[in-house]
Image (spheres, helix red, strand yellow):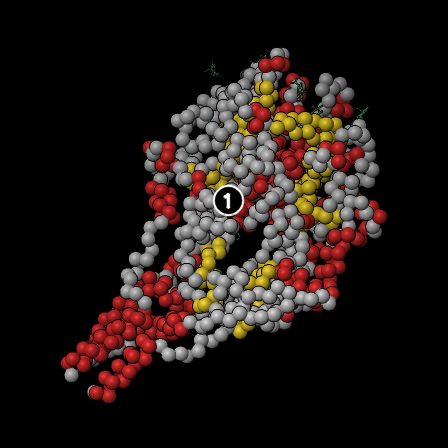
Amino acid sequence: MGFLRCAFTCVILALFFVWTGSGRSVFEWMRPDNFDEIMDKLSSVTEENCRSKPKHELELPGASVSQKPRYNMLLTSVIYSNRSQLLHLHNMALNRAHYYSFIYQRLNRSVDFNYQPGLMYLYMSATADVTASEGFLNGSAIFFDNHCYYPNWYNKILDFNKTTPLFGPRAWREDDYAETTNYLREPTNRTVDIHDYGAGWNKNYSNQAYKTAPWYSPWMPDITGEQDSLTKFTYVVGIKFSNKTGTFIDNEFVAIPYFGPPQPGINDREENSPSLPVQWSKPYFDCGRSNKWIVTASAPVVEYMPRYSPFIHLRRPRTVAVSAMDIEFERIDINPCPISDGNPEPNYFAGTARCKPTTMCEVIPGYGFRRGGYQCVCKPGYYYPWWHDGPFLGIEIEQATGTEYDAWFDCLAVEEQMVPPNEMPSFVERKKRSSSLQDRFIDVISAADSSPRVSMGKLSTTENAGKRQKRSASKKVNKLVAKRSAFKTVKQRMQERRFIPRYPGEKRFMRHKRDLFDQEMYSRMEKILYRKQTTNKENCMTKPDYELYLPGDAGYGADKRFEAEARTALRLAHFLCDFLQNIDEYEDFGSVRGDKRLNETHIFGEVLANVMSNFKILGSGVFFDRYKFRMSPPINNTDPRFVHGITREYFGPFAYTYMSADTDGLEKFRALDYAGLKSPYTQKRWFRDMKARWQTNFEGLKQYTAKPMVRSDPNGTSLVRWEHYPLKYFAPKYEHGEWLRPTFKCDGMVDEWVVTYIAPFFGTNALKTRLEFHGVVTVDVKLDFLEIHQCPGDYSVANAFKNTARCHFKSQYCIPLPLQTPTQRYLRGGYKCECRQGYEYPFNDLSWFFDGQMMEEEYNKMLRGEPNRYDTLKCRIAGAASITLSWVLLSISSFIYLLWTRI
Ligand SMILES: *[C@@H]1O[C@H](CO)[C@@H](O)[C@H](O)[C@H]1NC(C)=O
Ligand SMILES: *[C@@H]1O[C@H](CO)[C@@H](O)[C@H](O)[C@H]1NC(C)=O
Ligand SMILES: *[C@@H]1O[C@H](CO)[C@@H](O)[C@H](O)[C@H]1NC(C)=O
Ligand SMILES: *[C@@H]1O[C@H](CO)[C@@H](O)[C@H](O)[C@H]1NC(C)=O
Ligand SMILES: *[C@@H]1O[C@H](CO)[C@@H](O)[C@H](O)[C@H]1NC(C)=O
Ligand SMILES: *[C@@H]1O[C@H](CO)[C@@H](O)[C@H](O)[C@H]1NC(C)=O
Ligand SMILES: *[C@@H]1O[C@H](CO)[C@@H](O)[C@H](O)[C@H]1NC(C)=O
Ligand SMILES: *[C@@H]1O[C@H](CO)[C@@H](O)[C@H](O)[C@H]1NC(C)=O
């Protein structure tokens, strides 16, 4: 009997280990990888110890931020939504670089000196970059090189033509949770600190020993001029000014050339090529400042130096400053999947995902620097086991124990795959079923059953040694479970009828319902796309007005997709709010001259910078309400009417990209003052609507706070508070602006299908007693950059294209899959049809889904009566594993049977 008992125990133990996979300990399967290495680096540096650390310990490898947008690939490759923050950073750095290059070269005569942007202009511009781009960027700065900045606000103590050593106002979003006025003790994200980095205790950022200025060395000091042809570029913008309502000063565009950031060739593939206009820094610890790990995008500001010199031949364009935008490193999505087409080198975190060999890794956006931002989908030729609906999520895998990991996250092989037919289904290639797979399947099922039984631990005291053994084994498992009791076990989560949306807005029914195609919507979509295609620059004049619009729901998704572009307009609105509400042209502060009024050229520069820094923006304008734009009195003015300046009836600078034949298709940029047009813009629907909303009611506007610290003297001996500290202003949020429906702008300027975002801005009335609506800022974004969403949508979603995907919903469900055409995405077919649970992809062609474009194409062929294979593009019912003979199971069961009969 003793022998038998022992044998029995052994068998049970053996079975147990077969069931639960290998006996590896809990976290043994998680080996340290590159993620841990970076994590260690991050946590070894703190606010307290960073000053004593050497420079290389305050930096991470450049490859830890992968897929940085490169200027010359923006139009040729798709920038995914997981890079939209970096793209915005890139574009904003370029935006400021263009603006300052333009304004300092345009206002370069000595009489213009006082019209140049003043001290607060620079501060407020940086503030607006930060406050308007919540969620995108947290820091904005312009850093001037040694003796490259001519302060026009020190004209009382510094001679004209004198420079400051260094000057670098930088705005940073402050964590204001501890502020006395913040009774909620929750960061409002609306407070900004602005410090002049060229002043105070650690001011020499041009020094090699300055550890946290990675934006300095790529551009400055620019002394020799060897690479001038590579690093500078002459831009020409055309501007048509107006000084009187309804007429232009000159009917021709005044061409204004200026030197600006470089323009790379399309073949400059190197990441740090000097001809790229925007350079990325390695992630670094911003020691003593924000004390965060940040990444900076920087772009050069170019100017003729020395600016005021009678020796013209000694002057040359020189990089005088960099504009720098910062984002927190932790906010940047990492891609833990192995290197592949969509995940090119260099990527420091490649391969840190833990997908099993039967699955493929896909990234999930929005995770930032965290583990688990991926999911494992079945490889072509595999399907999900019956107990798991959809992909294995990275967070679940990362929380699994070794045992769970071994048992759970595998896909099962599809058998009898067919070779895809070329035209008509002609033959079917059959493969032999392998029996080893069945075994694995049974293993998985039994593992699924075994663990809960064991973990229930209901076995009370028995004398049975075998049972005791088993119990100790069960305790082991229980411990594993208990250790992680804070989480639900992976098993539990899998057993719940869970639903994880695979795209924003996906509901459970969309994956299970069988009838999700809407013929009416489909015909409507065809009409919309037809109108879009047939309207162009040549014929738009002949079309009736209503044909120049698409319905509002045809612009579905623009608010998400083009948020960065809209925030470019919002930034300008924030700047104008700050400036108009806080600047008093009569104020002077001891040695510092206060800012004066806005100049027309400033606003022209701002709108031009908006279109020049972002390919998607075709037009951008600022439209002042009637009699709200105040001009300075003319120089040497004696006319008493103009002592306090005059207001212009209309002022509406509008910049747009301009393609013309005579420039060989080279893009040029033009701007004109809408005031010169015959019909006033204030009568336009979009302007009247915005004004009607904001004319009397300012409910909802948010108050922003800026805390400017300025230098105490021209040398920047110390930092002191600005006279007005803090500065507060009311400004709109992103939601306060409005997206207009897709429109063909047939105005001889933009001549394209665009969606327009409009943001209001506010000044004060003449007595500075209350807010007043002062106008709107607009951006026109090219509609072709928007992709359409054909997958099923909820009934409440205003999307003209929902429920038009041609998937076979009985066996498939629809997932958006952006088209791989970066500049032309407003087309059908941007989705894929994946097999539903219980169905499998039947073809042996290294794919696991049906592409939307193919579905549309075959469907159209079918409609036209051509040969097609639309009917074969379906998933088939997954083959249930048939019960076949397993030698192991057979011998074990006969062994047990034998034992049993003997007892
Ligand atoms: C100002 O800039 C323009 C164009 O770049 C140039 O032609 C002109 O000489 C400059 N004027 C002065 C005073 O530097
Ligand atoms: C501030 O920003 C954080 C992080 O972006 C966000 O979680 C939080 O909700 C924001 N706070 C407010 C009041 O908007
Ligand atoms: C507008 O400019 C033109 C050309 O410089 C000038 O002749 C005209 O007097 C100006 N008009 C006003 C109202 O300033
Ligand atoms: C401005 O400064 C430069 C360099 O210091 C000098 O060459 C030039 O003569 C000065 N110009 C004027 C108008 O003072
Ligand atoms: C900006 O700062 C806030 C508060 O510190 C932080 O929560 C957020 O992640 C930061 N955002 C970016 C884009 O860096
Ligand atoms: C961003 O998403 C795309 C498509 O989902 C993917 O190919 C790419 O690797 C992702 N990039 C990063 C850095 O996560
Ligand atoms: C803008 O600057 C120019 C000089 O470049 C000046 O003639 C004009 O009056 C200024 N406009 C305003 C509104 O200050
Ligand atoms: C600034 O520094 C220079 C050189 O270090 C010195 O000559 C000058 O007097 C200083 N200016 C002021 C206002 O302190």
Q: Which residue is mark 1?
A: 67
Q: Position of residue 489 (x, y in %)?
A: 37, 66
Q: Position of residue 608 (x, y in %)?
A: 67, 34
Q: Position of residue 804 (x, y in %)?
A: 66, 64
866, above or below 595, in the image:
below
Q: Quadrant of residue 23?
A: bottom left
Residue 751 visible in the snapshot: yes
Q: Position of residue 238 (x, y in %)?
A: 72, 30
Instruction: Sort mark 1 into few (<14), some (14-19) or many (20+) by Cα contacts within 10 Å.
Output: many
Left or right of 126? Residue 654 is: right
**Residue behind label 1 places its C-beta within 8 angstroms of ligand 6:** yes
Left or right of 332? Residue 580 is: right
For badge 1, the amino acid type reads Gln
Q: Residue at x 46, y 56 (%)?
A: 361
Q: Quadrant of residue 622?
A: top right
Label 1 element class: loop
Q: Residue at x 49, y 65 (%)?
A: 381
Left or right of 854? Residue 250 is: right
434, above or below 779, in the image:
below
Front position in the image: 183 or 210:
210
Q: Residue at x 54, y 21 (%)?
A: 225
Left or right of 572? Residue 282 is: left
Q: Residue at x 59, y 22 (%)?
A: 317
Front position in the image: 676 or 309:
309
Q: Number of numbered discs present?
A: 1
Q: Quadrant of the N terminus?
A: bottom left
Q: Quadrant of the C terminus?
A: bottom left
260, above or below 16, in the image:
above
